[in-house]
Amino acid sequence: MRMRYSFFVRCCLLPAVLSAVLSGGLSLAQDPTPVITVPNPPNTAAQQAKHYVVLVSLDGFRYDYPRRYGATHLLQLGFKGASAPEGMFPAYPSLTFPNHLTIITGLYPEHHGIVANSFWDPEREQTFVYSKTQSNSDGSWYSGTPLWVLAEQQGMRSACLFWPASEAEIQGKRPSYYLQFDEKLDDEKRVDQIVAWLKLPPELRPHFITLYYSNVDHAGHNYGPDSEEVRAAVHHVDAMIGDLLTKIAPLHLPVDFVIVADHGMVTLRGGPVTLSDSADLSNFHTEGALLYPKPDADVQETYEEFLAHPDPRFKIYRRADLPAYLHFDANPRAGDPVIVPTGPFTLRASASDTEGINKHRGGHGFNPRTMPEMKAIFFAGGPDIRPGVQLKPFENVNIYPFIAEILGLEPPAVDGRLDVLRPALKAPNGKR
């Protein structure tokens, strides 16, 4: 029966599905949400035998929230699997788009190119804005190979229920299933969609899946990390994780769960810091606190002007002289000079920059090595994860080779290293 069913799927069901996709008429019965289905090839026979990974991002979920606010499902997952009790270091800057790209490509922001949520590219003479479709769905902005692209390149289907860059075609590939970002999409339906994908026939079933929730980040920005609103948001998304685990268990599939956050959250202090109070920036193009010299600008002179008017709330560097551990000195998109805040202060280039100023009680984007509140959660559990493993703080760039190893994919050269998270794997040699 198995051979006959597989033959039917390959010869009858799959061509019909792909034909419907090409004609724009597909609506899989299992899909409770408006999924965009791409006519990628089916899973190869070898990939059908592989395990599954569901990668979940809980935006803004600070490393100490699970214990502080009682995230019972996450804590139980960590008890049965692996966790980082003292947190995971986000890449600098600890912002949403740069870190989601670092997690999904294994590259620091200076290498995958998304150095901030919004930035100027001096070569393109264009601005990337994370919230604009014209930018975020244009694959030419992104460097590196996202995990869903890696999977599709190697004959394994993938699915993205939201993730920065998942709406873009990168290296000629898209995930087999994805959605256009809609923050209003019901949280429970997101769980149901993951389950629906895992119920598809083996040839069509994605083995790498992403899921995203922003509730905790919004609560942290609006009310601060110490608020009852953050506590409530933590309990809500933790319940969603519990629902996800409960609904997938009856499928009896070898699914590994990797639950992360892109960054933490800290209470902001004082009013905005205006950089033009310390130096003349009239010869610079600015995006937020990023400074891009125009052709007639004297960068060294501006740098020295900043030094002559020191402000304890930030440090000033020529880009080439940034501390090496920040991994932020190699991409012109970061600007020059580069301003690094020394505390939880909101920076802006000039007093006319009012967007987002004084609206938030909580913030992020700061140096995670000097501000522990920027550290994020990491939990992993499933058939390939050793139980009871507690990892010391590590950089999120190492998640990429970890997931590639679980999926049995051959990764490209990246900034992350498998050795960092290898202790969390049951099969350290990666042979499954």
Image: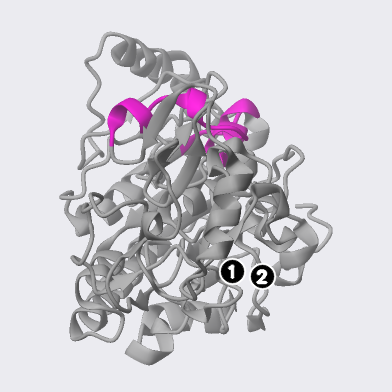
Taking the spot 38% from the left edge, 20% from the top edge, the residue there is 13
Q: What's the mark number on residue 152?
A: none
Above or below, 127 against 226 in this view is above
Q: Is residue 360 visible?
A: yes
Taking the spot 27% from the left edge, 40% from the top edge, the residue there is 181
The part of the image, by quadrant, that contains residue 37 is: top left
Secondary element under disc 1, as helix, strand or loop, is: loop
Which segment did they paint magenta? 132-158
Q: Amino acid at mark 2?
A: Phe
Above or below, 97 against 133 in this view is below
Rendered location of residue 390, percent (x, y): 65, 82
Rendered location of residue 256, percent (x, y): 55, 60
Say which residue label 2 marks. 394
Rendered location of residue 192, percent (x, y): 26, 52
Q: Is residue 134 magenta?
A: yes
Seen from the viewer's position, the closer of residues 314 and 34 is: 314
Q: Is residue 42 magenta?
A: no
Q: Amino acid at mark 1?
A: Phe
- For label 1, the crowd category at 10 Å Cα-Cα, with few meaning under 14, some 14 to 19 and many 20 or more, is many
